[in-house]
């Protein structure tokens, strides 16, 4: 049978309230007594019920993380970074998702207003205006990933998608002047897609190119969708000597495999680049040139800001922008610049 707080108190010859004060790290217990209680806890292997403790303290010791999707390595890396930092700081992590087609009211109500979590991290890249509006009235500390919620007090952790995409496209234009560049993005309302597409358009405009309508394609960031779409287009792209700029590595991998299935060579017949630098970028053959996005760092930094907010509720809002960098591999040949 697991040891109880009563067992610890009896072993250390102190009251239950003294054990509680030691567990809650209050400075009301002298050093000798604290050591005796800690020794009893260690010897008995006592583990406090964090949820019961939270009820007494009006804290849950749980932090919430709400993402647009739980599919794919981009989100799993954010979760990994957040979970590791959460454990380091003595909290637990509750993860859920709210998609663009989901009003999310049940999730947000349960997570944000019913005492389940002490604070919440949300990624708003594909959340509806209804969800954003409900978050304006959040009664708990809030950290927003890759976006903003007008009218709400929150901290922000964002990725510099625009600069990463701009640098990559500029190097493509410099390396292959006059060659067509096709953009494959996510949903038109996805904030990351908007950032990356704007950078693509900006660089092409600088060299006097306005991309044709068929060269800007909105899919859903998934390998299977990109593979199916590219199967119908790779021969045309290859005939034009084009480069495909996929706004994430999963779609880029789908294009690579569609090209190989059509007996085309990468990068000799068709060049392909991705974005995010997820594990799949090194599993394709050839490996993908891509833009590294510090996803795990993003999750960890968001947890740090949330815990800082819990400790300092009145401090000014923080906005952290994490840099990106181009990673050159084999899928687009040699790139000029650095």
Image (cartoon, rainbow, N blue to C red):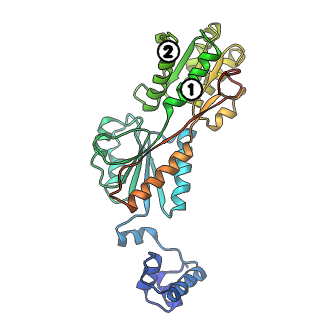
Residue at 56% from the left image edge and 21% from the top image edge = 169
> Residue 267: in sight, yes or no?
yes
* The one of 172 and 229 positioned closer to us in this rendering: 172
The x and y percentages for residue 158 are 46, 40
Q: Secondary structure at mark 1?
A: helix
* The one of 116 and 30 positioned closer to us in this rendering: 30
Q: Residues within 10 Å of mark 1 (few under 14, many from 20)?
A: some
**Alpha carbon distance from label 1 to label 2:** 13 Å
Residue corresponding to mark 1: 167
- Mark on residue 206? 2
**38 lies above or below 70:** below
- Whether label 1 touches label 2, CB < 8 Å: no
Left or right for 275, reference 210: right
Residue at 66% from the left image edge and 15% from the top image edge = 270
> Residue 247: in sight, yes or no?
no
Mark toward the start of the polypeptide (1 vs 2): 1
Q: Secondary structure at mark 2?
A: helix
Left or right for 149, reference 285: left
**39 lies above or below 233:** below
The x and y percentages for residue 261 are 69, 18
* The one of 35 and 39 positioned closer to us in this rendering: 35
**27 lies above or below 72:** below
The x and y percentages for residue 118 are 38, 59
Q: Residues within 10 Å of mark 2 (few under 14, many from 20)?
A: few
Left or right for 324, reference 193: right
**29 lies above or below 145:** below
């Amino acid at each position: 049978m697991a040891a109880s707080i009563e067992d610890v108190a009896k072993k250390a010859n102190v009251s239950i309230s003294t054990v509680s004060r030691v567990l809650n790290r209050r400075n009301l217990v002298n050093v000798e007594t604290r050591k005796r209680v800690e020794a009893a806890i260690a010897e008995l292997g006592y583990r406090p019920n964090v949820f019961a403790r939270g009820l007494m303290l009006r804290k849950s010791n749980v932090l919430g993380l709400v993402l647009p999707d739980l599919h794919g390595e981009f989100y799993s890396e954010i979760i990994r970074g957040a979970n590791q930092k959460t454990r380091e700081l003595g909290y637990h992590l509750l993860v859920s998702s709210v998609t663009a087609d989901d009003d999310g009211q049940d999730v947000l109500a349960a997570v944000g207003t019913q005492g389940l979590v002490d604070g919440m991290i949300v990624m708003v890249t594909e959340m509806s205006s209804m969800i954003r509006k409900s978050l304006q009235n959040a009664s708990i500390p809030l950290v927003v990933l890759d976006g903003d919620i007008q009218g709400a007090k929150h901290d922000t952790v964002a990725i510099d998608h625009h600069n990463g995409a701009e640098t990559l496209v500029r190097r493509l234009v410099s390396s292959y002047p006059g060659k067509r560049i096709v953009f494959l993005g996510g949903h038109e309302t996805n904030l990351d897609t908007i950032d990356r597409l704007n950078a693509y358009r900006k660089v092409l405009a600088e060299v006097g190119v306005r991309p044709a309508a068929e060269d800007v394609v909105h899919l859903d960031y998934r390998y299977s969708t990109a593979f199916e779409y590219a199967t119908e287009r790779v021969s045309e792209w290859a005939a034009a000597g084009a480069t495909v700029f996929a706004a994430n590595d999963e779609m880029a991998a789908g294009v690579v495999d569609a090209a190989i299935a059509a007996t085309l060579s990468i990068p000799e017949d068709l060049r392909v680049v991705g974005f995010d630098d997820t594990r799949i970028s090194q599993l394709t053959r050839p490996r993908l040139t891509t833009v590294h996005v510090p996803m795990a760092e993003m999750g960890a930094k968001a947890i740090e800001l949330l815990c800082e907010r819990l400790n300092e509720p009145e401090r000014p809002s923080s906005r952290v922008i994490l840099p990106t960098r181009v990673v050159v591999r084999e899928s687009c040949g040699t790139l000029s610049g650095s």
